[in-house]
Amino acid sequence: MRDVKTISYGEAIREALDDGLAQYPEMILIGEGVPDPKNIFATTEGLREKYGAERVLDMPLSENGMTGICIGAALGGMRPVLVHQRIDFALLSVDQIVNNAAKWCYMFDGLQCVPLVIRVIIGRGWGQGPQHSQSLQAMFAQVPGLRVVMPTTANDAYHFMLDAIADNNPVLFIEHRWLHHINGEVDKDRSRDQLVGAAVLREGRDITLAAFSQMTIEALKAAAVLAEHGIEAEVVDMRCLTPLDTDSVAESIGKTGLLLVADCAPEMASIAHNLLSKLFLSHYGMMRQPPRLIAYPNHPVPTSPFIANHYYPGAEEIAEAALEMLDKRPLTQTVKAKLQSDLAKDLPDRSFAGPF
Amino acid sequence: MRDVKTISYGEAIREALDDGLAQYPEMILIGEGVPDPKNIFATTEGLREKYGAERVLDMPLSENGMTGICIGAALGGMRPVLVHQRIDFALLSVDQIVNNAAKWCYMFDGLQCVPLVIRVIIGRGWGQGPQHSQSLQAMFAQVPGLRVVMPTTANDAYHFMLDAIADNNPVLFIEHRWLHHINGEVDKDRSRDQLVGAAVLREGRDITLAAFSQMTIEALKAAAVLAEHGIEAEVVDMRCLTPLDTDSVAESIGKTGLLLVADCAPEMASIAHNLLSKLFLSHYGMMRQPPRLIAYPNHPVPTSPFIANHYYPGAEEIAEAALEMLDKRPLTQTVKAKLQSDLAKDLPDRSFAGPF
Amino acid sequence: MVQTTADLKQLYYQMLRIRRIEEAIAKRYREQQMRCPTHLCIGEEAIAVGVNAHLSVQDKIFSNHRGHGHYLAKGGDLRRLLAELYGFAEGCCGGRGGSMHLTDLAAGFIASTPIVGGTVPLAAGYAWAERNKKFDTAQGFNVVAVFFGDGCFEEGVLHETMNFAALKKLPLLFVCENNQYSVMTRLSERQPDREIYKIAAAHGLQAASGDGNRVDEVFTLAETAIANARAGHGPQFLELHTHRWPEHCGPNEDDELGYRPPGELAVWKQRCPLLRTRQALLDGGLINDAELEAMENSLAEEIEQAFQWALQCSRPVVSSMELHLYA
Amino acid sequence: MVQTTADLKQLYYQMLRIRRIEEAIAKRYREQQMRCPTHLCIGEEAIAVGVNAHLSVQDKIFSNHRGHGHYLAKGGDLRRLLAELYGFAEGCCGGRGGSMHLTDLAAGFIASTPIVGGTVPLAAGYAWAERNKKFDTAQGFNVVAVFFGDGCFEEGVLHETMNFAALKKLPLLFVCENNQYSVMTRLSERQPDREIYKIAAAHGLQAASGDGNRVDEVFTLAETAIANARAGHGPQFLELHTHRWPEHCGPNEDDELGYRPPGELAVWKQRCPLLRTRQALLDGGLINDAELEAMENSLAEEIEQAFQWALQCSRPVVSSMELHLYA
Ligand SMILES: Cc1ncc(C[n+]2csc(CCOP(=O)(O)OP(=O)(O)O)c2C)c(N)n1
Ligand SMILES: Cc1ncc(C[n+]2csc(CCOP(=O)(O)OP(=O)(O)O)c2C)c(N)n1
Ligand SMILES: [Mg+2]
Ligand SMILES: [Mg+2]
């Protein structure tokens, strides 16, 4: 009998951590807040009770030191999963991540390896402001020797987390906070993707929407409404960043001839440039029109909701750009109206009530 | 009378620091080794004697703390220039650079500013190995609020350093170690470029070579030999990274129709992707052929010269690719032969005798 | 030492003011119009008040995510704090920062930011700039103080900063508010059993610890420390023991979550800095009920008016979002 | 304590071996065929030898840029060290690391790397993994030792690591080689006037300091510290005073540069750890000239043979450069 169930992305991560702890006696789960009553937005709930305080534990506020300690523990035979509630805090540990974790296997000629997972949460909303809502995926995805993934679906969240735990390399596992509450079907028996490759989440022949992390959800929303108007967008989830799966995108463009890329990061910090550039270098002339990029503005996110709510593009902007590219501008108002939501722009879902 | 003289890039930096210290009583120059007998490859020579130990000083091995201290000093009215002998050490201070320096003006609504220069040296050669020869320009150039420059010529080194000191924003000033010994004419009276814009260092009508930092020197070498064969390459020095000057490159492509970009960084860590992607988005269809990118391989640099010497592409690879694009493959052997040097591949110049 | 009745009354008034403001913020926060993470300092008022009592406008302070008390005790503008919480253009950061990013340069409150440890070296750098100015034998140095928590002490940057501050004999006061928690994690899960201030002492700082819930004790400790820093004797360190009453972030109490040992909060509430000081004032016959009531009334009025002012402020123009990336 | 003549002779021999190897490397380095930054430990041999004397192959060590002595004293393969310096495939890192990246897992030398402070938390993490294993009452814990300099002590990560090590009572020995210099910068330009080991003590570590140029003293201090760590008493810290004779990086002396006070190097040369030990052995009649000469001869032979072996090693294949980015 297959083990298939519908759970949220956050629950999928919890299940993967649970299964990982069960499967790998050498795995430990560590991070600020991991065993506290809020359990990293409930993604580590109950794990300390089940696996003990030696394996599921909190840590001092020492991001660089603790990253190094986890690297050393990995060298000593442990399999640490280190959690940062916000990716911004990982900036304190870039030294250990880049200088050591990413290079260790290479610089010691393959004699040693660092099985380490670093879970980081990116996000937005409720006035997190300039220092608590950065999108740093491109900063890390450019480091040779790191694996960087940003799963979008609950199923990928589950499998990527288990794959990351099993992997003998340092993996940066990036979760968008706004994905946590979204439900999806998790099929535990699905064979592994080994942390590589994009995924086509919706097929279509008219335009390719290649999107990263939470922007994939926005692209799917846009695609659903576009479909009501006879436009079939293909949505490609760029869930693995090292390497970028340009082939899957090129294959899709082969069908559609049009490409729109959407990233949840400021334009200048977008890994989408790498994707576009690689396509430019290797698939020049495939497209009927120049591609488009939808990304955040090139400045930090202000705290005030009155302005921050205008910082983030979403399904509406994606749909509008797609309609322009398809020369269907007259549909714009109708489509955008359907995409509008009465949920406040700084809340991920209705259950959310601040402060974060 | 104009003040024009021919000096090395390293001397140009020293002169700019000297003139900066003279001009701004609030400027201080700090870094590991700044006042020691080797003076950061002689770029800070004599400055302590001239301006005193309070203004020209060494520091503890505390990269993050000292970056924060320099930010605080800047808020308190000083104008610090902080030096790291290798960009790798700046990875310890990404927290203060990204979370504070780059965001301070924005997050305090323009009420405060951080006039700070961080000088970092990138480089290669003599077995620096995986942790001492990284090329991290793209990592920093993607951070909104930082200014990032990589001057190639002695004249730009002089003026950019003075501009950076005068600027009220954090500036990351990236020097390639192999530029230090190269002579150039410095015209002190030349008006300022304000740290923006690319520079056409050689005009040509056949192909555009857009290059970063030391790769511009390689492009110029290639262009010189190509010219002997009637091929006129235009060399654009991408000396400022924030923002990238796509217009100048597009203008050049308008003449040549062909683009080759060369960066001194691994392909996956290359800011050239941002340049190419932006051209793709805004100048689609300008080129007669797909562009090309010459960059380093996607792994750290090994120490052993027997392999490291094969890590770095240079003038030969640029010329070869250009000839291919121009459909002049038969010239390749002749051109490459002329570009060959008897200088060991891990030495910047003949005066160099290790260890670094 | 607290010399006069007026002093002690003033300290009490300042603490009460912070308490009432924080309570008012908590109450209004529940209306979900202040949409930013907000860390209240209820229970810890004595530290902000006792230290800032010795600082003039020339002196500067830096603070952290839990910054309202520091800002108010330093003389930061209440109305602009509230406007900032609401995200309005008249906020002290134009709405860009919210509760975790405060500034009031006119009051000498340079900045608070929420990356733990982030402002500590900045304070040292600012003190270095002050130290580099001419020494005024009458006034001494302007002093810079930085407030941070016991969790922050675990960040390496703190130690880097102590080393540099001691090396350069900076006029800098480190104030460690040891409330035993980092979010919901107890000190004993994060640090070995030894005293924080002794590490500072080992670094070469003049260091002391004390009861952060006794405003007179804080006042006295800070008096000496600040006088030392001002006179050029180098950096000072105070570890002050205290306790936060509300949840780490947000307007509510959270004792039901069970991360505090049963009864702990109750004990600390008995050690309330306000209660103790009021009792001392009453016991000594230094204040009477009418005066206390007058205080409450004038504060209620001030706070109400400040909210009224803040609530009629304007939303920042959307296009303003692009401004000030560079100076 | 050094109990027997055999012990002291062995310590002397180990120090002499490191000295002669470093001298041979210096000599050959000038031929410009070892093309990597190389930091020699001449003058500091007693620390590596005195500490490693108490470590078995089960125990592990981590080191820094100045790692040859640590590697050799731990039993690292000499021939593969030399091959590494030449960038050959048979080097201990396949030529990928050079002098600053050594490893010999069979000997329990896990790694040295050149980012200052980089290996310190790794050592703690490794010790944590050891601590998590079953405690063997007869053997105690395997111990991990990490060697670093006085400059490294300025890195925040060191303090973060001390805190965690003390919290978890790790079987970890911190060995601070205080040679008073970071590159060419004196301690007094980088740290205030206080003792390093006392900061470690304040962090809750068992800490001591001693003369790093007396191998018997190092041996005795390390004996106690390692026994404590092994028994589960938590992390240990030794600050050992010493001096580097050659330039910071490279094969030469550099006294002419003038960054050391005049005469300083001469004084330290009189305190040469080898000289002192040899004198003690001779004075006590524990060794004679013939034995000393035999030692020299056998070392000369070993070193010559190792160089011959290394020099006939093979260049790594260019295409191998792409391998092992991932495990
Ligand atoms: C570098 C960093 N790591 C983690 C966090 C998340 N965080 C915010 S406040 C806090 C607790 C800080 O504790 P402490 O310094 O004792 O201050 P307190 O909240 O108790 O006043 C944490 C972990 C952060 N903001 N920055
Ligand atoms: C993080 C970092 N900063 C700076 C350097 C450059 N550097 C290499 S060795 C060294 C001196 C280290 O001094 P110490 O720790 O005392 O060791 P010693 O060389 O005296 O043995 C410095 C500054 C580096 N490698 N890493
Ligand atoms: Mg606390
Ligand atoms: Mg030293």
Image (cartoon, coloured by chain):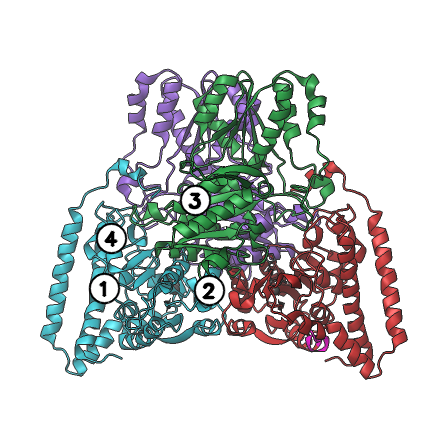
Chain colours: A green, B purple, C red, D cyan
Q: Position of residue C281 (x, y in %)?
A: 81, 79
What's the mark number on residue D164? 2
Q: Name the residue beneath numbered marker 3.
A: A162
**Amino acid at pointer 1:** Ile
Q: Name the residue beneath numbered marker 4.
A: D29
Q: Say which label, 4 or 1, has the lower sequence index.
A: 1
Residue A82 is inside the magenta segment: no
Q: Is residue A317 above or below residue B71?
A: above
Q: Is residue B15 visible?
A: no
Quick one: label 2, few (<14), some, or many (20+) residues within 10 Å?
Answer: many
Q: Position of residue C313 (x, y in %)?
A: 82, 46
Residue at the (52%, 17%) spot, across then down: A257
**Amino acid at pointer 3:** Leu
Discs 2, 1: same chain = yes
Q: Name the residue beneath numbered marker 1.
A: D18
Q: Say which label, 2 or 4, has the lower sequence index.
A: 4
